[in-house]
Image (cartoon, rainbow, N blue to C red):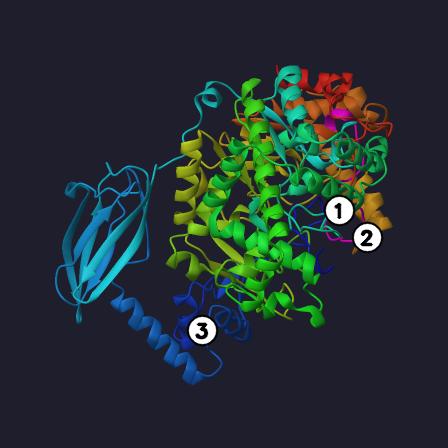
Amino acid sequence: MMPENINEPIEETVAAAPAVPDLANQQTEETPERLARPLIQLAKSWGVATQYFDQLGVYVEIEDHVLVSILGALGVDATSDEKIGQALADITASNHELLVSPTVVKFTGKDMPVEIRTKYGEPAVRLKLEDGADADESFITVDFKAADGDVDVYELTVADDVPAGYHTLDVADGDRRVAARLIVAPAQIPVPAAVAERQRWGWMAQMYSVRSNDSWGVGDYGDLKTLVTDAAAKSGADFMLINPIHATAPITPLEPSPYLPESRRFLNVTYIRPELIPEYGELTDAERAEVEQLHASVAAANTTPDPIDINAAWDAKRKALEIIFDQPRSAEREAEFEAFQKEAGEDLEAFALWSVAFQVWGSPWNAENDWFHKFGRGSEEIEKLRKEHRHLYEFECWLQWIADQQVTATQAAAKDNGMVLGIMQDMAVGVHTYGSDVWWSPERFAVGAVTVGCPPDFYNQQGQDWGQPPFNPNYMQATGYQVYREMVHNMFSHAGAIRIDHVLGLFRLWWIPAGEGPRNGAYVAYNYEAMLAILTIEATRANGMVIGEDLGTVPDYVSRVLAEHGVLGATVEWFARVNNSSVAGDPYADPSTYRKYSLASVTTHDLPPTAGYLQFEHVKLREELNLLSEPVEEFMKSSRAEMDAMLSLLVSGGWLRPEAAEDVPNHVQEVVESMHRMLKDSPALLLQAALVDGTGEVRTQNQPGTSTEYTNWRVPLADADGNVVLADRVFDLPRVKSLAAIMNK
């Protein structure tokens, strides 16, 4: 599905850090001369950082041509001194006369005055609440603050008793009238009572990897329902973190990475279990036989340890779903379907039409077949496509409805069986360049000119380009971050918690101009308060939790702000060294020092299972794939130093017997369990155990830095002997039970 140069963001493993430079005499800020330059002032006025500090703390200035390119992606022409001067004058005048910001944020209990700039005296301000009612006059006050040339500056104060929600401020100034979105949110996401009561834990699973005899070659929503039910009943788990289940392409070949979706607004329909659809029970004998034959064509793969063939599975399942779709629905079911379509609105229309175009006209990234850029929203060709392929359009909408029902039922089953949170969904950083979101609403993105990634760091000295278009912060601000609100709301309608991959993206994203490579990018700022307010509202309404993946090079203020708003951070034992050192072999931190407000785990999905890590599978795999930038002996040396440091802490803390530490190959399970025993001694509110660590799996699910070179995101769950583990049996395995017993102590 994706061009091969696209890689999802990673949380990397060990690497010998380069020598730390002497920073005593290093430059730490921009000079007055640089700050006085019009280009620098223009960039800053549009939220584009003109400098940053790298992973070593070294000050780095962004080159002029990079700033010009990024400003261009924001719609600002900075290609000459004259145009820079005009653009700077325009933005200065616009800010000077701005009546009110189109997005206003208020956290309850926090003084957050809103500036109103008028030309005609005191403004007229009305507040309309989310439910459409006019607010009490006492909810807002407007006071004169100062004169600023030809503009009077007023200060609007929003009272703390305004209910949480998405309200509208109507501000008028003579002939100017603005409707601004007022987002009022609790100051902090409350910790659910059951989590505040005591530490809770859950499993992490790549749901596609865990199959049953009833699967269609790939783990599905039916298997997930079995997993969460059994995890609660048999292991006492309170949640299950799963890979992103955002929408993918309608037909094969499919993009295997769940972190590169076509849309984050909708669900992955390839995970639907056909037999759980009510209309399946109404099929004729002949139709049912046809579905069963399609299932049989891929079911044999359920018990093989070979890489999952996601394309064969979807080709067979899609045909079965077409048969079920054609089955007449009851009046009640038809009404439910129509209600779903109405509530999903234009975004569903966009996704369904994109899916139809994809099937009728083919993949859009070939120059000779570029319907993606030729035909968009409102074009005659798209309207003709809608009319001529109405049945296919309805089918795509129906698939989303069925997926919605099955995930909703799974979350209900998790809660009914005692899970405190149930499903913990993973939110990907962005979407595919050729996805439906970008096609239908390109104004939401900085399309074509830039992509998202990260600058060079300890683990990737060239930096990373993830190939995804970033949200346009100006569009988001102008529309009250409505797109983000809808996405978060939809995710919480199917989950008790959300994990945000690369949570730094709430604050800033590294934009890379086309053709520059990840080294030559710059950070662009976003209204993190607006997105945190949305997360706070939606999580509070769902009695849920939010976890931000703040691993790697993340400024201290980011973790501090997240904690202030009740967003948990992420702590990983393999990364948790004293003083946050990145040097392999440096001592590991005692678990008592872990953050309370975090999700703590032994490992992540970008590392091999712990059994594999302890046996240096990552070293072997990287050597095999030619991913090492140093001799394998050096990488093995740093990996051994890392493991020795971990074993030293485990032994000294009393979590591991010295005899086992001296003979790891023959005590792998004991070491794995000791790391989880150590995890239990942390104060973290939430703990996580990987299902692969329970079964003894050694194979890597995802090898960062690869695309087709390795079977990323297609490795079925197996045990220590390489035998496939089925969904309905996994929690009966002695090894899984043993790990669960440790987590329950």
Residue at 46%, 43% in the rendered image: 343
Taking the magenta stretch, the answer to whether it contains residue 696 is yes
Magenta segment, which residues?
693-713
Q: Is residue 479 left or right of residue 500?
A: left
Q: Which disc, if any, is residue 709?
A: 2
Q: Name the chief secondary structure element in magenta.
A: loop
Q: Compared with residue 79, is residue 152 higher up or lower down, i.e. above or below?
A: above
In which quadrant of the rendered view does residue 700 lie? top right
Tag 2 or tag 1, which sits nearer the N-term?
1
Which is more N-terminal, label 3 or label 1? Answer: 3
Do the CB atoms of the residues marked 1 and 2 lie less than 8 Å apart?
Answer: yes
Q: Is residue 497 left or right of residue 306?
A: left
Disc 3/disc 2 C-alpha distance (Å): 40 Å
Q: For the point 57% across and 61% down, which residue is it?
A: 439
Q: Which residue is mark 1?
A: 703
Quadrant that contains the C terminus: top right
Q: Quadrant of residue 295?
A: top right
Q: Where in the figure is residue 642, as x and y percent of width and height?
A: 73, 38
Q: Position of residue 571 (x, y in %)?
A: 58, 35
Residue identified by numbered label 3: 76
Q: CA distance from mark 1 to mark 3?
A: 38 Å
Instruction: Identify the amino acid type marked 3.
Output: Val
Q: Is residue 125 visible?
A: yes
Q: Nearer the viewer, mark 1 or mark 2?
A: 2
Quadrant for the N terminus, please.
bottom right
Secondary structure of the residue carrying numbered label 3 = loop
Q: Separation of disc 1 and disc 2 at Cα?
A: 9 Å
Assess whether residue 733 is covered by the magenta stretch: no
Indicate the position of residue 126 as horizontal and vertical percent values.
20, 50
Q: Is residue 8 left or right of residue 482?
A: right
Q: Looking at the image, which is closer to me, 666 or 128?
A: 128
Of residues 639 and 735, the one drawn nearer to the viewer in this rendering: 735
